[in-house]
Image (cartoon, coloured by chain):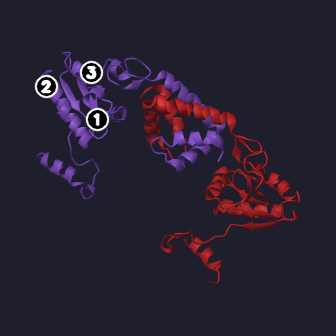
Chain colours: A purple, B red
Amino acid sequence: MGGPEVDRLVALLARLPGLGPRSARRAALHLLKNRGSLLEPLTAALERTAEAVKPCPVCGNLDTVEPCGICSEARRDRSTICVVEEVDDLWALERAGIFGGLYHVLGGALSALDGVGPEDLGIAGLVARASDGAVEEVILATNATVDGQTTAHYVTDRLEGCGVRVSRLAFGVPMGGELDYLDEGTLGAALKARRAV
Amino acid sequence: MGGPEVDRLVALLARLPGLGPRSARRAALHLLKNRGSLLEPLTAALERTAEAVKPCPVCGNLDTVEPCGICSEARRDRSTICVVEEVDDLWALERAGIFGGLYHVLGGALSALDGVGPEDLGIAGLVARASDGAVEEVILATNATVDGQTTAHYVTDRLEGCGVRVSRLAFGVPMGGELDYLDEGTLGAALKARRAV
């Protein structure tokens, strides 16, 4: 319906996370029904974003300035680097406003299944940063998945000899989490890491 | 995060049906991470669609040709017009492949709450089409909502004197629907419209 132009638009929209084939069709129609207020501004915003936003050569964050806003912020603690898999994770931590150090985006996790090896991730860059003398601690904040854990182990090995402390996020019961709904792995980790009150 | 360009892109993406603020941010990042394969093709597809796709002057469908592919298809039954609220509804009926006549898109439903009056909908155009002598039946396929029903009643009144039969879609239990999960309105309508076996 609507000709090949609409079909192509729907196919592309369906590749966005959160949209399936059906919701992509609804989104395409919504765009067509709101040309001036949505379709045209969105096209312009996509163009401007593609032009302006680049990965930071230091940490891999996406920003309009080089190095990125975080790397160039004076009041950041330059002795601590938090290692994350993706830019999404960095943004999640920043939104939480709980970390004042620098970041390093690996660009994914090691995965035998998906054929992602160490050379595909920004590990060499991390080792170089960790060896520059100013860094004291590297916090591994990869996902608590098999691939994320494997990556954390591998990065720990690679950081040996850099003279930095390597730590990782704690595992446990999420705030507001009900034990009843948690998997055994989380419960086991929370029990093992229990603290005296 | 990512500068004002990304914030603006996220704000626009969040206005698509199916995407909220959080998934819009994920979609924006996904676009930035897949520039060549997604961001740029999507920008181009939006531009081409905005340029090529126009509402059909006869029925209100969206298409790249005028009149639209359905209005100009020779094998369509020109004696029947199916009236729908939105282009989405027309496309849903076409996907089902169950109707061989023509359509008329009203562009919404009467709504006191949203301030949509008869003059905001394509009702005058429908009356003109229904009066041209070739049309024998108008099928009302507005939504089974309060606004859709009100619109159907109003359109029925306006079509009086045009010399056409006016019908509407049947109400009842949806195929595969379990009675247990249906609301009382649907059950009541299905009972009232029961048929001899």
Q: Which residue is mark 3?
A: A125
Relative to B106, A13 lies left or right: left
Which of the pair B93/B23 is nearer the observer? B93
Q: Disc number at residue A160?
A: 2
Look at the picture and state if B127 lies above or below A36.
below
Look at label 2 and name its amino acid.
Glu
Residue drawn at the location 62% of the way across and 45% of the way down: A29
Residue B20 lies, in percent from the top left, at 48, 44
Of the pair B144 and A46, the residue shown nearer to us: A46
Name the residue beneath numbered marker 1: A109
Q: CA distance from mark 2 to mark 3?
A: 15 Å
Inspect the image, locate mark 3, and give the three-letter code of the amino acid beneath it. Gly
CB within 8 Å, label 1 to label 3: no
Name the outermost residue toward the front. B75
Indicate the secondary structure of the residue bearing disc 2: loop
Looking at the picture, how far across and down is residue A160, in whole percent? Answer: 13, 25
Q: Amino acid at mark 1?
A: Ala
Sequence-wise first label, 2 or 3: 3
Q: Are marks 1 and 3 on the same chain?
A: yes
Label 1 marks which chain's residue?
A
Image quadrant in which the C terminus of chain B is located:
bottom right
Whether A52 is drawn above or below B137: the answer is above
Q: Are tags 2 and 1 found on a single chain?
A: yes
In the picture, the quarter occupied by the N terminus of chain B is top left
